[in-house]
Amino acid sequence: MTRVHISFILFLIAISIAGMVHVVRAQNLTDTLRLKEFEVKSNYSTDNSCFKRVKIDSVILINHQNTDLSNILSQYSAIFIKSYGNGGLATPSFRGTTAQHTQVEWNGINLNSPMLGQVDLSQIPVSQFDGLEILYGSAGIARTSGAFGGVINLVTNPDWNNRLNILAMQSLASFSTFTSNVNVAAGSSSFQSHTKFNYSSATNDFPYYNDYLKETIHQQNASFALFGMSEELFWKLKDRHLFSLKVRYNQNDQNLPPTVTDYNLDHLEKQNTKDLFAVLEYKLVGKKYNLVVKSAFADQRMQYRLDSSINAVHQYYQWISKVRFSYNGIRGLSIRPGIDFTYDQVISDDYDGMKTRSTTSFFTEVNYMAGQRVKTSLVIREDLIDAKFLPIVPALGVEYFPWKNQDLSFSVNLARNYRYPTLNDLFWTVSGNPDLKPETNYSVEGGFTLYHKSNDRKFRFDLTLTGYYSWIYNMITWSPASGNSNLWQPENIDQIHARGLEAGLNFNWKVLNFDLSLDNNFNFCHSTYQKASSAYDQKIGKQLIYIPVNTLNSTFSAARWKFYLNYNFCYVSDRYTAKDNLSVMPGYILSNIILGKNISLRNFILSLQLEIRNLMDLDYQSIANRPMPGRNYAVTLKFSMPKLNRQ
Amino acid sequence: MKEKNTPIYNLLTLFSLLALTIFSDSCSKTPIREKTVVPPDTTHTVSYANGIFVVNEGNFNWANASVTFIDNSSNTLIQDIFRKSNNRILGDVAESMKIADNLGYLVINNSNRIEVVSLADFKSVSTINGLDSPRFLEIVDSTKAYVTNLRSDVSIINLKTNTVSGSIKTNGWTENLIRYNKYMLVTSIGMFSDPSAQRRAQILVIDTQTDAIVDSIQTGKEPIGLVIDKKQKVWVLCSGGYDNFEAPSLIRINPELRMIEKTFTFADPTLVPSRLCINPTGDTMYFLRNGVCRMPVSAAALPSQPMIGPEGRLLYGLAIHPSTGHIYVSDAKDYVQNGTVYQYDTYGTLVKSYTAGRIPGSFCFTKSSNK
């Protein structure tokens, strides 16, 4: 391989991931991989590390191919996931904000519904992406406006070394849960095709103690069947041009379970969703510049049914175009202007007629490295929505490296951000409020990152500490209209002040051929209501509902003799169920354990994995009156060919 | 492969210590359930003979409905009395409560059932299932009651067996009920899935002996309040439709002739009235509309100003004490915290305020409640 070829591969990875790696966790017998930041002289710099970005190691994803994004985030990140249970709605709560303040992207397409403004993370299977990066707070401004909490970025990458790779996985878990994945990747050094199928179904009739009946019964009407497939084609020409086409189709039929009081099942709620996403991308790589042009289409059809009394269909279409130009000709400086254009169209049984919205986003990112120690980054974004300009969204960050090897860095950033109302907020029949103003967010963040590696490379640790202050004004909340208490309308009535601390501490130790690691994420978040909505409102200064003040997740891993063991535990502190903080869901600790073995045969690898979830058989509820399963098990058999070193 | 012993022992010790701390931490076997920050008072024993039940709706699909009791005998306030007596939650959206024959009937709208409790100790004696989003219950006689439903017909309840014994076919959503001689007058709003334009708003006249609809009287859109005055005239409060189809109105009906006698139309369509009530002597009506409004039955026009202003509160529930005539009105605040009930005398002077539960919506007064 020529030097240019290696650089090009690195460039592609960099473009896809678009950020510097801060935290890497190793779990199996793999080489620990830490991507160093790119120096400008390589011409492929992807700097902008003054903001907090964390990449979840792909090895973690490999062990969790039988599950979905919500499980990965709740076990391995500082994001709190509010979940209705196995296969049920799971939404992120990031830095004291709500689900609508977190954007999830797949290969650059926003997965948040333009109607609701949020994503159901339980409907994104891990098998559908290769890389997961989390952009905290104002780091998301480089990608979009409105994501006050942050952006979760899912990517799929080609491996140009691959000729043929087949992966088949079958998982059997408690409550008649079946998950199957088949991935086939084939190609040459200039062409790659990835085909993926995933199917997951469960009757989900787990036993739980029903306080109403005072006996253990089985959960009802909670079954689901999720099917997805995707096809990705990558074509590289002369190491200068890269074309890719990625198409993904998902279908989910879900039954929505009732609260614990409705064991009678008089009324059955069902929901089915069909999505289609397609992205066509062209990258041009030059000596001092590169250009990315992306065109995408997204569409979702959701149907909700309640017995025979309600049958509502909601359909949205999105056409997206993105152009990004990056110029690195001047030493130490990179300038990246771009334009995004999105056209949303919604046809819903609950809207009066078809509604549309055009959003054009102009932005530029300027990164400057002053000497070897100081890096600065400025991002400016301006959105034009239906011919109306929003105020400018600026973000400014500085990073300082006191040591030459850059193992220690301090960073500070501040930003102002806007989130415009969702289409439901504007156009829902009768209740929609077209006079809504966008929400405003001011945030400031500071922190440091420290790496240490022992001289013999057998011991490593990294420590990240970030503190933030964030203010949200004119937050949109649905509440009863002043003249008519039976009519609920969205209004700019709330004001939130969030402050917190995020700490990550990861150790990795190779001893006696054991590969051990301990990864910890601790999160403190005090997010409070600051504005009264009525005269005797008791919520001022109180914690937002369903947002825990403290969360901690830790994973201990050990690997030896081709066996691997993961022990993960998550602690979630109390969450209030009332805005006056007078009623509460008590905190709890959940632990999970995975034991697996990779059997190396001649041309392929067979993996057997056993999992015990909710190891302590805790009788818990995360959301009030919604039961959760006790101890449950999963067995997974994975076949992959050919044998890859990283397995 | 030869390995040294000491590092392995160190490793094992470390691992077991880690496992031990983790195991001991999460060994708690107490189920994790929603609870109040201030633990409820379990020592206090209460008689439910003399007081006011405040029915707290709770949030839709959260299953956090509850009942607060204002005890007039001991001058105390007890929260969540259903859970206190039965050690379980009440259900999802408690719409209303009715007392008959020393039993309390709690209509739980989104749990599709009625909880029947003994008024001696508020313990559940029975549960009536087979309803379809029930709203209000009205007693016909000691053996029979009618229950209105949002999604289907009027259910006939056999009070001896506490089961649904039949139904009266209606055109969808029925809401309020009042007795008039041998008839039951029921407000019928129309099909829940239809827009206001297609909903047929009327009052159904049901013969309680035959359970048949004998007549209907057309009203303004969405009739949500029904009272009878001292002159045996029936008043209906119409909201005008959830989609502001027409202006709200208050209609007086002669139930004998089954004809509309007078219609008062509200000038400002954005202020929607609700919770029509009447005082014990049947001469003064009250309703919520940007505050508490009072209107004598003999008035020639709608009140121009509320008697009790909202004063920044989100007034949600209203009831008039059947003996004292005092006004009980609730403030639901922002719907996601405890509400407050305010008691005013007939002059509009504040007597007392009480903390209630989540979204206090309706009230139920015991037979002997005074003060």
Image (spheres, grey):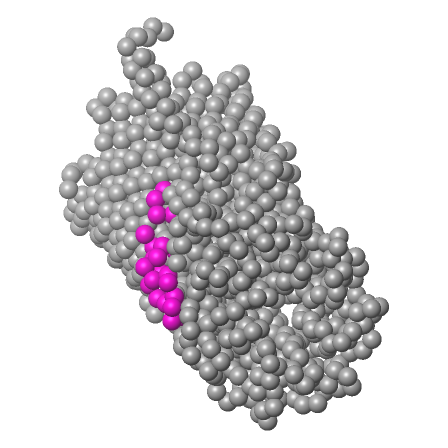
Q: Position of residue B321 (x, y in %)?
A: 54, 72
Q: Residue at x 69, y 78 (%)?
A: B197
Q: Is residue A540 magenta?
A: yes
**Residue farthest to the bottom, as pictured:** B300
Q: Position of residue A233 (x, y in %)?
A: 54, 43
Decide which of A377, B311 is in the foreground and name it. B311
Q: Residue at x 79, y 62 (%)?
A: B167
Q: Residue at x 57, y 87 (%)?
A: B296
Compared with A345, A123 (above or below) is above
- Can residue B23 be seen here? The reply is yes
Decide which of A219, A171 is in the foreground and name it. A219
Count up the numbered dots.
0
Q: Is residue B175 magenta?
A: no
Q: Position of residue A37 (x, y in %)?
A: 28, 41
- Can residue A311 be seen here? The reply is no
| Quadrant of the image occupied by residue B181 | bottom right
Compared with A613, B256 (above or below) is below
Q: Position of residue B235 (x, y in %)?
A: 66, 82
In the rendered view, does B338 fall on the left or right side of B215?
Answer: left
State the predominant SS element of the stretch in magenta: loop
Q: Quadrant of the N terminus of chain A?
A: top left
Task: Find the magenta span and give its range.
Answer: A526-551
Compared with A628, A120 (above or below) is below
Decide which of A80, A620 is in the foreground and name it. A620
